[in-house]
Amino acid sequence: MFNVKLFGLDKLFLFVVLFLCIFASIIYYHIYSISILEKSIHINYQKVVDVTKRFHGYYINSDTISLKKGVHDNDGVGVIVNKLGDVKVLSPAINQLYKSLSGVIESKYIWTVAVIDKLHNENTENSYFKPLRDGYLRFNNKSLHDSNILESIVNLESLKVSYKSFHHDDVRITEIYKEQWTGEKIYSVIYPIYLDTRLTSVIIVDIKRGWNSLLIEKFNQKRWTHFYYGKGVNWATFTLALPYTSDKYSPDVSIDLLSILIGSFYISCVVFFAALCGYYFYVKVTIMRSYDHMTGFYRRDFYEPKLKALESASFLMIDIDHFKRVNDTYGHDFGDVVIQEVAHRIQNCIRVNDIAIRWGGEEFIVIFQKINQDDLMNKAESIREVIESKSIDGIEITISIGGATQRDFEAVSDAIKRADIALYYSKNAGRNIVTLDKNNYDF
């Protein structure tokens, strides 16, 4: 009978191969996704820049009012006036910019929206903050005697290189830095406003560095990936080229190998278990279709078509003596017990490669390859003796056997007929006898 082994070294090896294939496939998918991630971040950065650029028109066309030197709150926007004079009314525009940015960046990641005027003869070097933090006030007080508050901010936030590289309608996004007056780690979108080729003001949108991680997290959720900002294993770390940044600022994004290992193991377990169940089901169906459930021998309807391919095979046709009498006397249930026990004893007498078929109700065929006539006779006698030697539930049971060896170029069906004729002779000779066809053309 075919036995199904659910576990073993062979299946462990298959699981390891499956795991490595899944792990490699997921790694390849992540490598392929790097360019898509970079493009996704580009799109989000571009949205922020596009929204920020819209402020230019508001700034140019804004009205002015006269304010005293000092700090003012104008509709939620802090205005620091360092020199008496006309001050642009930018609060509606800054509030609109903040609202528009909130549609691109979650509000909790917008740190500050600021507008810093550059000192020229005709303006007052004012600054606008939403929100106006205490740190900015302290900074402003310290800078009252500076000639240019904008350049002080540029120096303070290490933006000198970007500032010098400004040209008309230019934008820069800084590297992540720690804001001195608040201690917050941010990066800034800096957009200059020019009038008559002169830099008059700069819009600064400060974004908390957590937004980068959020972009990665959203991408991971959408694409089923595992990336994180930062440097990991060399071969699993990739450098992103971000828009509007200096060449030296190229953040690293790494593949989360631990998460992929865990995920690969989980997927491998699910796939392997499903495949194992499918294999187990297939084997069970094959067993049901191929094997007789009572004896464990092959079913005749399954194996008979395969017999045509045999050559030089030897056949033993085995029949239980007086089986009808056993059924009539002791009942069909006992008859089933007899069939099962006889089959079991036959199975114990033959080799693993020998083929046993339940040919009829109480009739069996055993097929041997590469066995001579004497060995065939000895094998038949050993089967007959093992059945005769021990009763089955106290009832003496015997078998009759007929055998034949396939002739050169002889059809299997003809060899089986000769074995059946030999069985007929055994029964007529008194049963519990072995008769072999001598391979003569006349029996």
Image (spheres, rainbow, N blue to C red):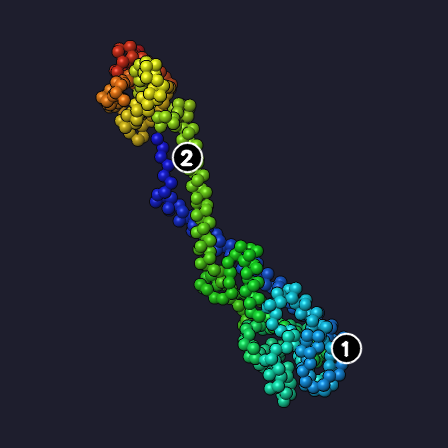
Residue named by callout 2 = 283
At horizontal 52% and vertical 56% (from top left) the residue drawn is 225
Please determine whether, in this image, residue 440 is positioned above or below residue 202. Answer: above
**Residue 338 place in picture, x, y as percent:** 31, 21
Q: Quadrant of the C terminus?
A: top left
Nearer to me, 82 or 271: 82
Q: In the image, is 416 to the left or to the right of 81?
A: left
**Residue 70 place in picture, x, y as percent:** 68, 85
User: Sequence order check: which comes first, mark 1 or mark 2?
Assistant: 1
At horizontal 71% and vertical 75% (from top left) the residue drawn is 75
| Disc 1 crowd, CA 10 A, few/some/many (<14, 14-19, 20+) | few
Residue 63 tag number: 1
Please determine whether, in this image, residue 99 is positioned above or below residue 321. Answer: below
At horizontal 57% and vertical 56% (from top left) the residue drawn is 222
Res 390 → quadrant: top left
Q: Amino acid at mark 1?
A: Asp
Res 333 → quadrant: top left
Please determine whether, in this image, residue 373 is positioned above or below residue 17. Answer: above
Q: Secondary structure at mark 1?
A: loop
At horizontal 55% and vertical 56% (from top left) the residue drawn is 221
Residue 406 tag number: none
Q: Secondary structure at mark 2?
A: helix
Res 348 → quadrant: top left
What is the distance, in whole Å, between disc 1 and disc 2 at their CAs? 84 Å
